[in-house]
Structures are given as structure tokens and as C-alpha cells.
Image: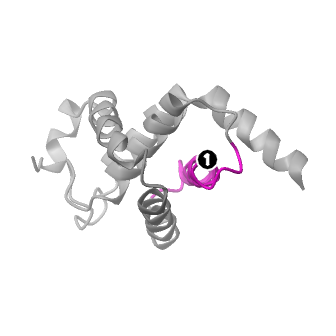
Amino acid sequence: MNKQPEDLENFDAQEQAEQAAETALEYRNSPQRAIHLVDEAARKAERNKASLRKVISDLAAMVRMVKAWFSKEYRQVPWSTIAIALGALIYFVNPFDAIPDFIPGVGYLDDALVIGVTVQSIRTALEAFKLWEKNKK
């Protein structure tokens, strides 16, 4: 389903995040696959940080949290939260999502919306993770 940039007003970020979270179930029993996806998301975020400037910090924290969960370093968050975060990362990594990433200037608007909605829904868990990271050092 490729939408044109003008269709962004009809884009439902919550729905997209929920659909991607369902796909996340495929990763639950495959830590190596999940870590590969998370690493791919981190590389893509780094390459496109200018386009993602409003969500890059939260995206980076979400990447670290999911990676820590799958590497069994941080398990103080329920699977449902990880599934939601992983769903957003799956959506983010897909270059042919609602607005294809290659469209200059708008290709990452939908990704930023999905990331923003996801971060809002897992904010408490993400803040707890960041506190854990800080205290771990």
C-alpha cells in the first residue's frame, strides 16, 4: 500500500504501529533475527538522522531497549512493550511503507509518526530503561 505524500492526512500511525507489532511476534523466538533487525534500524537511523531529528533520541533509546531485551541484559519490561517497540522498528526498516523512504523531503514523515505514537505508548517503560542505563554505568 503506497500512499502519496498528500495522503498523509489519512495516515493512521496507531494502526500502522499495531499492524507492525503483530509482525513482531515472528521475532520473539528468534533473538538473532531480532538483533539483526535492531542493528539495521540503528544504521538506518544514523544515516537519516537529519530527517528524523524530532524522534531520533527516542528512536535510539527504543533500539537500545529492544536490543538489551533480546540480549537478556534488560528484562524489566514485558514482552507486549517490546512487541510494540519492535513493531515500530519493523515499520521503520521497511523502505516501502505508507510513504516510500526515497521520496525527498517527506519519505520519513510516516516513519516519524509511527515512532512518535509508539514512544508515547511506551513512554514509561522507555524512561525506566533510560534510568536503568544511567545507573548501570
50 versus 25 height, above or below: below
Considering every residue shown, the one lying at the far front of the view is: 29
Q: Residue at x 32, y 30 (%)?
A: 18
Which secondary structure class fits the magenta region best?
helix
Q: Is residue 133 above or below residue 45?
A: above
Q: Is residue 49 left or right of residue 6?
A: right
Place of residue 90 in the rendered image (x, y in percent of width and height, measured from the top left): 35, 51
Segment tinted magenta in the rendering: 52-74
Image position of 40 with respect to 9: above or below: below
Q: Which residue is mark 1?
A: 69
Q: How is the image coloured?
A: one colour
Q: Nearer the viewer, residue 72 or 49?
A: 72
Question: Quadrant of residue 107 in the image?
Answer: bottom left
Label 1 Cα neighbours within 10 Å, binned few <14 / some 14-19 / many ≥20: some
Is residue 91 shown to the viewer in this render? Answer: yes
Quadrant for the C terminus in the image? bottom right
Q: Residue at x 38, y 40 (%)?
A: 114
Q: What amino acid is found at the position of numbered circle 1 in the picture?
A: Trp
In the figure, 134 relative to 104: above or below? above
Please tell me which residue is depicted at 85% across the width and 48% down the height of the picture.
134
